[in-house]
Amino acid sequence: MSVSDLAIVAALIFAWGTVSARLERFDVTAPITFVIAGLVLTHGPLGVLGFTPSNEAVKVLAEVTLVLVLFSDASRVGLRDLRAELGLCLRLLGSACRSRSAWARCWRWPCSGASTSGWPC
């Protein structure tokens, strides 16, 4: 990434900081803005950024972004609210763990051969 690429990204962040309050009234959030800006600045006739990330870099960036988003959402939940909705939270967490486990078993089945029953799950 060159100095001009960094300057363009810094200018984009600065521009978002100056107009974010106005745009959020219209439900235009930072993720929407930066995804559109990324597409416009890297593809097509306006493709001024000469940065092409590797697949591994995109994967790491996506994982870090997910961690930050989930953490920031979880930090806004009050302890009183969590206790009031504890049953719902545990049911959602339990169903997510079960569906993830079933998905993992189904995904491994074609790669490791059929199970004894012939079905992946």
Image: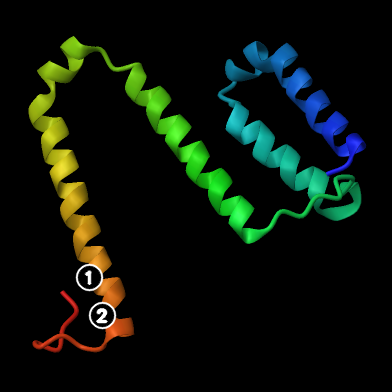
Which quarter of the picture shows residue 114? bottom left
2 displayed left or right of 13: right
| Marks 1 and 2 in Cβ contact (< 8 Å) | yes
The amino acid type found where label 2 is placed reads Trp
Considering only vertical position in the picture, is 29 above or below 119?
above
The disc at residue 65 is none
56 displayed left or right of 67: right
Residue wearing tag 1: 105
Considering only vertical position in the picture, is 73 above or below 117?
above
Please tell me which residue is depicted at 17% across the width and 10% down the height of the picture.
80
Please tell me which residue is depicted at 74% across the width and 38% down the height of the picture.
37
Coordinates of residue 22 in the picture (x, y in percent):
66, 13
Q: Residues within 10 Å of mark 1 (few under 14, many from 20)?
A: few
Please tell me which residue is depicted at 79% across the width and 32% down the height of the picture.
9
Coordinates of residue 3 in the picture (x, y in percent):
90, 35
Q: Nearer the viewer, residue 29 or 57?
A: 57
Q: Give SS at disc 2.
A: helix
20 displayed left or right of 37: left
The amino acid type found where label 1 is placed reads Arg
Coordinates of residue 95 in the picture (x, y in percent):
15, 48
Which quarter of the picture shows residue 78? top left
Q: How many marks?
A: 2
Q: Quadrant of the N terminus?
A: top right
Residue wearing tag 2: 109
